[in-house]
Each structure stands twice: as structure tokens, then as C-alpha cells.
Amino acid sequence: MDALTERATPRWGRVARRLLRWVLIGVPALLALTLLLSDDARYLARAGVEEVRILLARRSIARLVSDPKIPAALRQRLALVLAARAYAADSLKLLAGDTYTTYVEVGRDTLLLVLSASRADRLRAYTWHYPIVGTVPYKGFFNFDQARRAARDLEGEGYDTYLRPAGAFSTLGYFSDPLLSTIMERDTMELVATVIHELAHNTLYLKSQTPFNESFASFVGYRGAEAFFRSRADAPDAKRAAARWRDERTLDVLWAELARRLDSAYTQPLSGPELARVRATLFGWARAQLTGPVGQSLETYDWRWFARAPLNNAVVIAQRLYRMNLNLFEEIYVHSGANLAETIRAIQLRVFTQPGQDPYQALYSRPGLPAD
């Protein structure tokens, strides 16, 4: 039998120090390597840095409004934002939290560029996936060069792309979103509609249901702005908000019809010159509508803008994100006696009590009854 050998007692302090050293050195090194190799990691890091910068630059709107050193025009607009926010919370029962109680001067007129993309032979959105919000058919870039590179990369793979500026975004109440200087140049109606639109996101947001979320917020934003200005006896802005909502519903019908025609055409085995010919015909029809009878019937949009605007599958998808089944929201509003707070409550009730993944299907049902 071999002699027994006594093992030395482990030096646990030494082991712990080595482990801690590897953690302190290895984890940062791994994170740095990930950032160097992963576009997604670099993108999220940049977005996080920009969000921190914005949050650190916040100033109380209430203090700015009472500060005589602040230009009078800015103080008036900030006071309007506070009034709209209070109305949204008190009269419309939207979840305001601390959203838009602070202000940030971002130092440029465009906060970020938003990229949408679609296959050229299908009206099918290219999607990205993020924590909390889920799958979405667009991507926002604080770095404009990075946005253009991403668009070129997708175009190189055969996708239609659409880059557009954005002046605001929402963290859905997870952070105390400040009011950004990029939206302060909008007219008073659009400023108020934007405030209420973003508060609507705080109140109702469904993961991976972007068209529903944005269309619901558009409805609440414009109908809410109309109600707000009527409460202040501001007839011109109230009428303008109502007219903008009519325009949005008109455009919804047009984009839906274009989408239907494109979907029908794309069921055919098209490629090369034939695909290009069909697309040119359908987009030509849409442009003729936008610069002709439909565009010239709009009350708040200049139809001449549509003559220069790009048209492709990605544009159609992006336009429909904010204008999908808007008349359905309007029908519930009418059935609720034109009471917007009650309409919002009814929509929430239908969406949260009906099974299934399609919130629009839930809107066709009555509360407490299964959707047809």
C-alpha cells in the first residue's frame, strides 16, 4: 500500500485575490473586445452614452418658466408644454410620471436619424430586436454617419431603405424623459400633439406591436391636442388639430390602398426589369394621388412636398407605422360620445382583456366578449 501524502491546506485568500484580479482585468477586456467586434454592442453603447448625456443636461421646466433671464418666447412654449402635460394627466388620465418636467438643449436641430428597410420584391419590413420594446421595424441612430453606412449596407443587400430625421423619442416612462429642444420649433398645435403623443406611449405600449402603438399615440396626440385647445378657448389651434387628424386618416386610406396594390403585385414571380416596371407603375400612381386629388384635399399638409418625397417599399412601411387603421380608433371615439378619456380607457380594456397577438382584432370586439 502506498504511503499517504498529506495535502497542503489551500490558501483561500491567495485564491480569492487571483480570482478578483482576473475579474477586474478579464471582464473589462472582454467588454472592450465585444465593443470592438460587435456593431450592435457599439450601437447600444453609443445610445447609452447619448441617453446619459441627455439625462445629465436636464433643467427643470418650472424653474425655466419663472426665470426672467430665459427668452420670453421659450418661456411661453415651455409653459404651454406644462399646461398640455397637466391636461393630459388630469383630463385624459394619461400616465405622465416625470416625463416632460425637464428640458434639454441638444445643440442641433435633428436629434437622430431613423432607418427603415424592406425587401424590394415584398412589402416586408426589415426588423431589429431590443430589450423591453421587442421587435421593431426601424432603428434610430445618434451617429448620422453610422446611419448612412447602415443604409448603404442594406441597399447593397438589395433592400429598399428610408432615412428620416426625428426630433423626439420615448423611453416609455422608464426614465424621466426631458423635453428636447429639437421639437420646440414646431407650431403650437404640433408641439402639444407631440407631448400628448409621447405620454400616450407611457400609458399603453404593446411589445413588438409598433404600428398599433404609434397609430394609437397619433390618435391620442391629435384628438388630445384638439381637446386641450378647446379647453383654453383657442379655436384656431383646436380646428387645426382636428384638421390634421382628418388629414392623417385620409393619408391612412391612401397608404393602405398602395400597400394592397403592392402586396397583390408582389404575389407574382417578378424580378429584374419586370419588377422595376411594376414598382414604377404603382409608385407613379401613388405620387399622382399625392400631388393630385388626395394631396390637394389635405388641409394641413402642402401637397407640393410629395412631389419631392421618395417612394419605395421602406417609405410605405414607415408611413403606415403612424397611420394604420386610424378610422377604427375614430369609431371607438364616436361610440364613446367623443369623450377621449373614456375612449382611451375602452381601448385599454379591449386590448388587455382579449386573447391573441393582434391588438387591432381586439378593437373590433366589445369589452368582455371574444373578438370575431
Image (cartoon, helix red, strand yellow):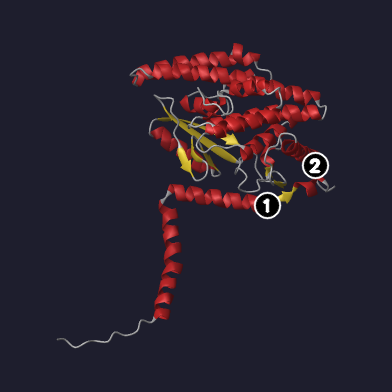
State the count of labels. 2
Q: Position of residue 96 (x, y in %)?
A: 69, 42
Residue type at the position of mark 1: Ala
Q: Residue furthest top?
A: 293
Q: Residue furthest left?
A: 1
Residue type at the position of mark 2: Arg
Marker disc for residue 69 = none
Name the secondary structure under disc 1: loop
Q: Would residue 295 be found to the left or right of residue 39 on screen?
A: right
Examine the rendered structure and indicate whether residue 214 appears above or below residue 46.
Answer: above
Q: Residues within 10 Å of mark 2 (few under 14, many from 20)?
A: many
- Taking depth in this image into account, of 369 and 48 the one nearest to the observer is 369
Decide if residue 231 is in sight here.
yes
- Taking depth in this image into account, of 331 and 98 the one nearest to the observer is 331
Residue position for label 2: 75
Q: Position of residue 245 (x, y in %)?
A: 66, 23
Q: Which residue is drawn at 54% across and 27% down?
A: 362
Quarter that holds the N terminus: bottom left
Q: Which residue is drawn at 73% across and 31% down?
A: 187
Q: Residue at x 45, y 31 (%)?
A: 125
Residue position for label 1: 57
Q: Residue at x 64, y 49 (%)?
A: 54
- Taking depth in this image into account, of 328 and 181 the one nearest to the observer is 328
Q: Where is residue 207 in the image (x, y as percent from the top left)?
A: 52, 38
Calculate the distance from the C-alpha at mark 2 to the C-alpha at mark 1: 18 Å
Decide if residue 168 is in sight here.
no
Labels 2 and 1: the sequence-earlier one: 1
Q: Would residue 279 be found to the left or right of residue 218 on screen?
A: left
Indicate the quadrant where residue 12 lies. Answer: bottom left
